[in-house]
Image (cartoon, rainbow, N blue to C red):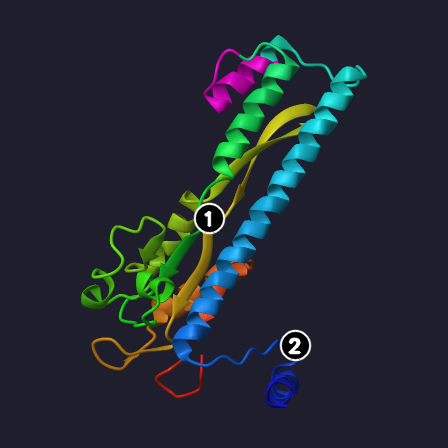
Amino acid sequence: ELKQALADFLLESTGEHYRIVVLNTGTEAVEAAIKHARYAFGRRLEAVAVACGENLRSFTSRLSAGNVEVTPEFLRECERRLGEEPIESGDELVSALLSHNRRNLAAQPLMAALPHAFHGKTLGSLALTWNRDARLAFVRNNDDVVFVHAPVDFLASVAEESIRYWQLEFHPLRLIVRSLPRLAALIYEPLRGEGGVLDLDGPSREMILSLHARYPDVALIADEVERGLGR
């Protein structure tokens, strides 16, 4: 079977296991990749929400058993860091953390694309297509899509856009903030075809490698079409 033959070839060539999916058109493949990236992002948010719930249940249990001391100084620190007052008890702290985490973990995924690429004519792919004439007739003012015009600054913006959520540690008791990238995927053409046939520039290549190294859960969608290698 073609899919297995391709997977076997890639395993022999790279030592990595691949799952091959054969679709009807390139646009269909791009749309499937975008939807999978958004789905995986949602699953990551769900896992974080579960972990936060377990963390607060553990705090409540320790508080009821007298195994953790909540001092007025600690509550004032929580007020300052959460930007919410008053927080005058452990129960009020739990309520505040639930509110903050639910609000932040309701964020929509952010998708990024490099310029000078055309990704298709479905709504998902058009939203990530650089060509304004193709895109704006169907998709306008999409706050969940960003085009990477300055690759050297992109990792900093990914960190700045990260979703922040709060948890408690118990030995000693302290409030900590964690983060999860809001970026679900970066799509790019290895050989870009809008406005000419353009090689991927060095800064963009370095950015993609650094993005994968720092945020391995963020999907990288290589929309390869110019060389005829498929998507």
Can residue 209 be seen here? The reply is no
Distance CA(mark 1)–CA(mark 2): 27 Å
Q: Position of residue 61 (x, y in %)?
A: 77, 23
Q: Residue at the left extreme? A: 133
92, above or below 11, in the image: above
For mark 1, give the secondary structure: loop
Q: Amino acid at mark 2?
A: His
- Please name the residue that numbered disc 2 is placed on: 17
The residues colored magenta run 74-86
Q: Is residue 158 left or right of residue 88?
A: left
Quadrant into which the C terminus falls? bottom left
x 26%, y 82%: residue: 197
Quadrant into which the N terminus falls? bottom right
Q: Earlier in the sequence, mark 1 or mark 2?
A: 2
- Please name the residue that numbered disc 1 is placed on: 182
216, above or below 55, in the image: below
x 32%, y 48%: residue: 143
126, above or below 54, in the image: below
> Any magenta on residue 91?
no
Q: Amino acid at mark 1?
A: Arg
Q: Is residue 172 left or right of residue 103?
A: right
> Any magenta on residue 79?
yes
x 21%, y 60%: residue: 136
